[in-house]
Image (cartoon, rainbow, N blue to C red):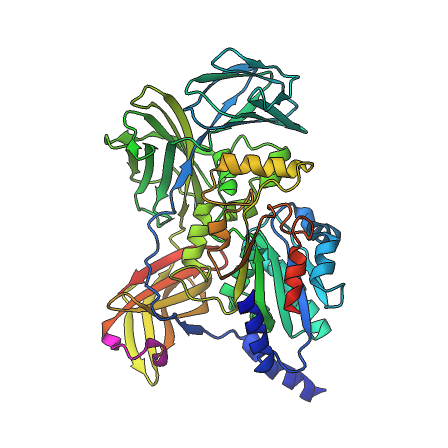
Amino acid sequence: MKRRFLLSLAVALFAAVPLFAKTGVVFIHGKGGSNLAQPSVARAYWGEDMIRATTKGFTIPYLVVGYDGTQYMWVAGGQVAGQIYNWMMANAIDDIVIETHSFGGVVIRWILSNPTYDSRYQPIINRIRWVNSIAAPNKGSEAANLAGTLSGSWLTGWLVDLVGQNTDSTKNCTTSSMSYYNTYYLKGTAGRPALPRTIYNIAGTGLWNDFIHTEDTGLATLSGIAGMPGEDDGMVSQYSAQAVGIVWFTTLANHHHNRRNDYRKIGDSLATDF
Amino acid sequence: MKKITLLLLLTFASSLFAADVTGRFDAGTPYEEPAAHAPANVSRMFTKSVTEPSSIDLYATGGSGMIIWTIAEKPVATKLRTPTGAELLPFEGGSIERGLRRFRENDDEVLHVMTTAAARYQLDVDAPATVVVAEPESTVTLSTWAAPLSRQPGEPVTLHAELRDGDAPLAGAHVTASLVNPRGRAVQQVTLTGNGDGVYSATLADLPMNIPGTWTVRFDADGTTPAGIRFTRTGTGELVAERGAARLGKIRTEVIGDMLRVSLDATMKAAGAYRLDVIVADRDRNALAWGEGRRELSLGATKLELDIPLANLGGTDVNDLLVDVRLLGLDSIGVAGRVTR
């Protein structure tokens, strides 16, 4: 926290952010259903209090991106880039802090790692101050591997909904797939070129947050079944979330809660950027 | 108006005509070859599927909790019988005191055995279902991978499994692998051969079908520990079958002004958009510099080149460099080719 404060101070003092920069916040959600492309569903993903807290009571211009949560990162990246590009141009935003949860952290890495893939990527990258990445499966998720293991018998249901059906976005997040993408397409892991913007990561290390929520039972179950090494938040292991960028902090909020401002006040922490 | 248009065009020219991007690695970054395979998946679980009401044997290795997740298309009633003869009946929720608990949400059901004995449990299900059983603290593990992670057409495929009880290898198990093609269909089953030290493997000269994309391998192992404890484990692995979109020739380098020009001939078998990646390291395998650029490539012979600023090489003799060139598909994601010098 202290290092980030000092960095913010240095940025302010040396005017790396233009003197009259117009700052904005972009929220990029994780994988899920195709209905996450709908603005209301994307907004509900984060919860109103997370958006309120992060934007200091909605005083910072913000964009809640919605994209089809079943798609590969390069498909999602196009949908995300289109919305960010139009929003920043229409509102003259030239200093963007990106907040991502889960697969959203992989999608923004795709954009940052492939500046020549899409003509909108580089102008967006130029305006990004940094990225706060919550529980991103940077080295994949053992929970996503389950979908491959159960391929052919993959039905619907409570836990399946938590993991996500064996969609392209779930396939994107297996540990093998992320190993492949980290080797060839994505930057930021050990031995690869650095990303053009800094990522601050936040890993979840707790499972049982709220015994009333069935999601907590489900995440604890997944953690046990999937065989996640070390600490995890029920969906993403700490080692994976911390494989890219600088560790900002860890949270006991599980994967259900660490995109919200409820069990732990993560939105309050994100708001310290402004 | 025209002036404004021109100014706008000039302002965004770089984004309209994306130039190559170059950079240098942080000092001390080791050059890393692409991994031959993904990190091993370590499993303490197994799955079984039944197509009709059945009694399923669940072999526990003991000393761990056990999670039993039943997935079905409609609500399913399950009865668990423990090695002592105790039963958790379908309508019972269980309790911590009994060491057996049941959680139900919609069509899914999870049973939790708080501490297992090393023995057989039995689960009765009254409908077709898939049962996923995990012992999260068990010392019996199955580690699996498939190689090569990026497989060009014609390359052999290695399927690898390793069984251990803690540090001790588990020999004599029956290990199979089922290959699932990128369309999700299981198309071949292979029996792996053990070499006596807990490692089981099989090498395939080719994949059973020429379908590019991610192939999933499901591994199933059944065996008995030296202490006579029966176990079952299910693991997974993946590899990417590449399209063979390009054949890359030898890398050439020359200094032109303040740039190191890296060039090579290529024969394209699939036209489209590609990303040309160049990574440069010194003889001690310290990564120095990188460059990348988008290329629109037609079928047939073509020349690829990319310039790396000499300033990014830190004064290293240009005749003493390790150069790694990769051509990556952008229209269709996949490695078209890779060569090093």
Q: Main secondary structure of the magenta part?
A: helix
> Going by the image, does B92 lie left or right of B263?
right
Give coordinates of residue B323: x percent, y percent: 30, 67
Quadrant including the C terminus of chain A:
bottom right
Q: Is residue B50 at least partly visible in the picture? A: yes
Residue sitting at x 64%, y 34%: A158
The residue most toward the top is B85
Residue sitting at x 75%, y 54%: A48
The residue most toward the bottom is B3
Residue sitting at x 54%, y 19%: B51
Q: Is residue B241 magenta?
A: no
Give coordinates of residue B9: x percent, y percent: 62, 81
Q: Is residue B246 at least partly visible in the picture? A: no
Comparing B289 with B121, the one in front is B121
Q: Taking B158 as reference, is B138 above or below it?
A: above
Comparing A218 with B17, the one in front is A218
Q: Which residues are magenta?
A: B310-319
Give coordinates of residue B36: x percent, y percent: 33, 50
Comparing A42 with B181, the one in front is A42
Give coordinates of residue A12: x percent, y percent: 60, 78
> Going by the image, does B270 lie left or right of A156?
left
> Going by the image, does B203 lie left or right of B115?
left
* Occupied quadrant, residue B309: bottom left
> Going by the image, does A68 lie left or right of B117?
right
Q: Taking B8 as reference, is A198 above or below it?
A: above
Quadrant including the N terminus of chain A:
bottom right
